Image: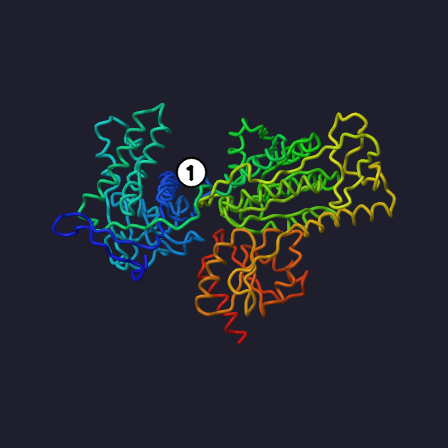
Amino acid sequence: MESDSATAVAAGAGASGAKAIEERDEVVIRFAGDSGDGMQLAGQHFTNETALAGNDLSTLPDFPAEIRAPAGTLAGVSGFQLHFSSRDVFTPGDAPDVLVAMNPAALKVNIGDLQPNGILIVDKEQFNEQNLRKAEYASNPLADDSLNRFQVFQVDITKLTINALKDLGLPTRTMMRSRNFFALGLTSWLFQRPIEPTIKWIQAKFAKNAALGDANVRVLRAGWNFGETAEMFRTAYKVGPATIAPGRYRNITGNQAAALGFVAAARRAGRPLFLGSYPITPASDILHELATYKNFDVLTFQAEDEIAGVGSALGAAFGGAIALTTTSGPGICLKSEAINLAVATELPVVIADIQRGGPSTGLPTKTEQADLLLAMFGRNSDSPVPILAPATPAECFQMAFEAVRIAVAYMTPVFFLSDGYLANGAEPWAIPRAADLPEIRAVFRTDPNGFYPYLRDPETLSRPWAIPGTPGLEHRIGGLEKDYLTGNVSYAPANHEQMVRVRARKIAGIAREIPPTEVRGAGEGDLLLLGWGSTYGSLEAATRVLTAQGKRVGHAHLRFLNPLPGDLGEVLARFRRVLVPELNMGQLVRLIRAEYLVDAVGLNKIQGQPFKVSEVVSKATRMLESSR
């Protein structure tokens, strides 16, 4: 919290004993602890409380892949960062204003990011000799001067939690598991968040174990009351609600939004939704979410492997369902042959690739954007597939819907390219009215007169969707090349070239449906920030910083990666230089340079973490200064 953004508002502090309340425009808070400390849960509920308080927000869950790394070690630290504001929020924030560290390992991993003079809340009792050794501390940082540049609050979270529960007769280990609710209660008081929604959630969650539910509620209130009554904290902070358009909102993650988008698309198509999937991080939540929507004619199939998952989706598409398979990068490698079968058979299947760090198993819980070229070219022969990429967690709904629409309209497999940052990140989402969503025309051929399996629509070049069992429409299907019209197996050289070219023209033709490229900031000028996917927030915030400095910088963000927008070449030509920030070694920038012969420059980060706004601003500034 920058001091110049704060406005102190006295609330009877001093003689009356009441705490002062300071108003802030924005706050970045990070919860950090051992992977068994419930930091993700605390962060999620702080997020829900914040959404209900009316703030705009963005989150960044960050946790290890191991189910349970050794307790108290640096490898086992789990964190959850939340940026909330009374203004527009685009990222989870570069650096936290507040850090809650539940043990020495959490402190050591995260302290380097805390703002100078930032608030540091630690569980004092956990800084014992054993935990300090596990965290590789030579001395106790709470006892030396190494934390002097921060506002340090040493709270006996463990002791106070146990004191709150000592009359319930619970095992010590069970009581320790409630420490996260003490931290949540304390920070909820510190930032004047409403805890009633969390209490309702606890009561519902532990309805069958009332004793445990009562314990968690008691600890949550103990944390709130500690902040209110302890002399340690003399000030609480208030962040006013953001100005948002009227409507009905909910807090939503990218994977939740994607799942709802697929369901909505299937409903607007009037067809059942089938998901064939093999669980893989970070895509599994889409499977979990869709499994709860059986009442919306959703069928989920947890296959024995990735190949079976996509194969079952192809079968569902052949049978007339809205077909979907979900996975991450390693799964795409296994699904590639079947995806190409969908290209050859021209069946509508959506492949949701929720990218993570790689190669191979790589960094399952960390984000990356390195599957773009895999989606573009990761199949044998010339086999183009449309690629759509959402830019924000909420936008996953819209792009999932659009992926289904394109798959059905053009009878083609479609890539939905999200990533771990979008999948797990959350933001407020204006819930659309179902009736306002466009209809998806899933039309089956039923008339046998004049039917040919590859008789194409003259506008979209899609072949008819003729489902099995329709009298008179019997036809071959499979991976061998087809005759241009009859669908019979054909090895004729000219026919093969004709089929390859028409499949390419079909995908290229989608460009006519792509809306004009929006350029935010300067419409023309010295530098264009060109991005795709989850870099949106960092690039948008950086553009605002640079524009406020008087620089002629624009920002264009691509939602369609294949085909690219028809006006993109003209947009690129309006700027002297082009910077393409990506969380990979430079995949989009290669496509841009090859397609438009533009000397675009890449800004690349491969650390499993999203861009900080400052990183983009720094690179852009250097480019602007070097081109003077």
Of the residues shown, which amino acid type is indicated by label 1? Answer: Arg
Near mark 1 (Cα within 10 A), the count class, few <14, some 14-19 or many ≥20, is: few
The percent position of residue 393, horizontal first and vertical second, equals: 50, 46
Is 159 above or below relative to 150? above
Q: Secondary structure at mark 1?
A: loop
The structure residue drawn at horizontal position 32% and vertical position 39%, both measured from the top left corner, is 180
Is 518 above or below relative to 483? below
- Examine the image and state in which quarter residue 187 appears: top left
The percent position of residue 98, horizontal first and vertical second, equals: 32, 52
Q: Can you identify the residue that label 1 sits on? A: 68
**Furthest residue toward left:** 15
**Furthest residue toward top:** 208
**Furthest residue toward bottom:** 628
- Examine the image and state in which quarter residue 37 appears: top left
The percent position of residue 136, horizontal first and vertical second, equals: 34, 50
The structure residue drawn at horizontal position 19% and vertical position 49%, both measured from the top left corner, is 19
The percent position of residue 167, horizontal first and vertical second, equals: 21, 28
The structure residue drawn at horizontal position 58% and vertical position 34%, both measured from the top left corner, is 278
